[in-house]
Amino acid sequence: MSDMSIEDETLLELINEEDFSDFLIFEKVAKKIFSSRDHETIRMFLKKMHFSFLANDESYRARVLERLADFVAVFSIDELFSICFDTLVGNYLAIFILMKQYPIINQESAKVILELVPRLEHLEDLYFFGFPYQEQAFLQIDERIRGLTKEELGKLEISCNTLFGIGILSRSREMVESFQQIYSVMDKQDYNLRAQLISSMLRGDYNEFSLIIKKFGVYETISEEQLTSKYFEIWKYLEKLSLPIFFDTRNLRYNAVLFNGNFYFLKFKNFEGKEKMVFPFSQVPLSDVSKVYDPRADVFYTPKERYGRLVLSDVYSFRNVEEIKENSHEAATAIMSMIEDEISTRIRQILKDVNITSHSPVELADVLTQKLCVNNPDDLRLSGFIIKGQSFGRIHLKEIAGQVLQVCLSPVQIVFLVHVPPIDDKALRLFIEECESKQKNYCVVDRNDLARLFMAYRVL
């Protein structure tokens, strides 16, 4: 390579690191520097880009990498490594180029990647800051990797773990099975056990999973109950074993079943309130699911796709009801004397909904509202309240049948049946059956629940 020109050297000395936060300045200087094709000049430029690259947001970093990729398009892979191996921005650029050239990592393309990625000097920083590019590479490794040497397998394991750790690899079952293939052919017992551990999770075998964990000398046994109580502890341990663990609620799928599209256990609550587990890439009937656990937020939530019975404490808008364990005699007496309008007024007061539902022979519900939130303040659901106050005696099928049928055929997502007098078994059964068959969430609120609710929000 030619010696660095005085002009380029002077230019880099004159420009401050923070000046590159101006994308136009970055672009003009980069174009000039890369046109020289002088490795030392380019490396100095990439080193000086360090501050602005990290000080700005992901969209800036993605734009920088895209533009740098244009400038190095004429470089060979060897040249790329020469200018990129020892700087943070260079490491990002090298991986970015490799992923654009090899979006599918299989036995053939892996040979290029495993020669370059383990030799990059800032991989730990890449783990820390993450990768600012959305397109992902697909890992597709099969039994043909048995033809790789022991050294090549070691480099492949390091490369794949690096790419997974910085978020380059597409999260899928195929990716997990590729890791299983790599670990199964490595000449170390610990890695073979890792392959078996992955296999037990993919097959949903608690006994085998527990047995293999025991061989690592950490846990004696892992029952389903222990999995629920040690959820994060086991997660972190599997990550330490370099298993490609991932979990995102966006990977959950609903179609009469709840499918876990993650490579970790899905935790949910059934309608008895008991915590249960779903193995990776397995499913459970949606009718068994009351709430789903979001590990990122550390909360159980009611998914929109789930239908069936809710209790008042499931509803964010009524969450304060949990604070009242028993209603008072005064509250019970007040509730017993309330008519429908008095109840609906208080419900709208709690929901801060000033829109009064018009009453007519064909009304959908006594309260029809878009102000009710289920999981959080942003989770608004169209909800209908069928209210039967003290003007009714015992509530029979004929008093609610028409209204229940209408509201279940409507776009309403959650149906509340609020009753002060007792309700006939046939009427209650019709309500539940119609809500279930039309895939509605529903909540039955009796006078005791209503008293607790009104006490909690001080509307009595």
Image (cartoon, rainbow, N blue to C red):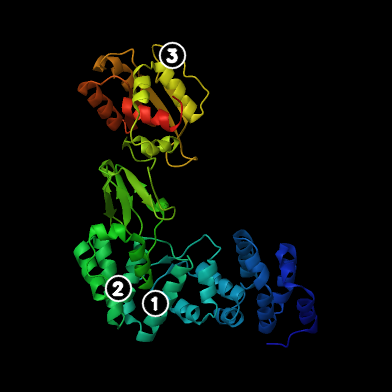
Q: Find disc 3 in the rendering and name its residue.
A: 359
Task: Name the one closer to the observer, 48 or 423.
Answer: 423
Q: Residues within 10 Å of mark 1 (few under 14, many from 20)?
A: some
Task: Name the one closer to the observer, 131 or 227.
Answer: 227
The answer to whether residue 41 is left or right of residue 269 is right
Residue 326: x and y in percent read 33, 33
Task: Name the one closer to the observer, 390 or 136.
Answer: 390
Position of residue 286 relative to residue 368, above or below, is below
Residue 14: x and y in percent read 80, 76
Mark 3 and mark 1: Cα distance apart in space = 68 Å
Q: Find disc 1 in the rendering and name its residue.
A: 157
Q: Find disc 2 in the rendering and name its residue.
A: 194
Position of residue 305 relative to residue 449, above or below, is below
> Which amino acid lies under the numbered mark 3 shown in the image of this protein?
His
Q: Residue furthest left?
A: 207
> Which amino acid lies under the numbered mark 1 shown in the image of this protein?
Glu
Q: Which quadrant would the C terminus be assigned to in this image? A: top left
Label 3 vs label 1, nearer the camera: 3
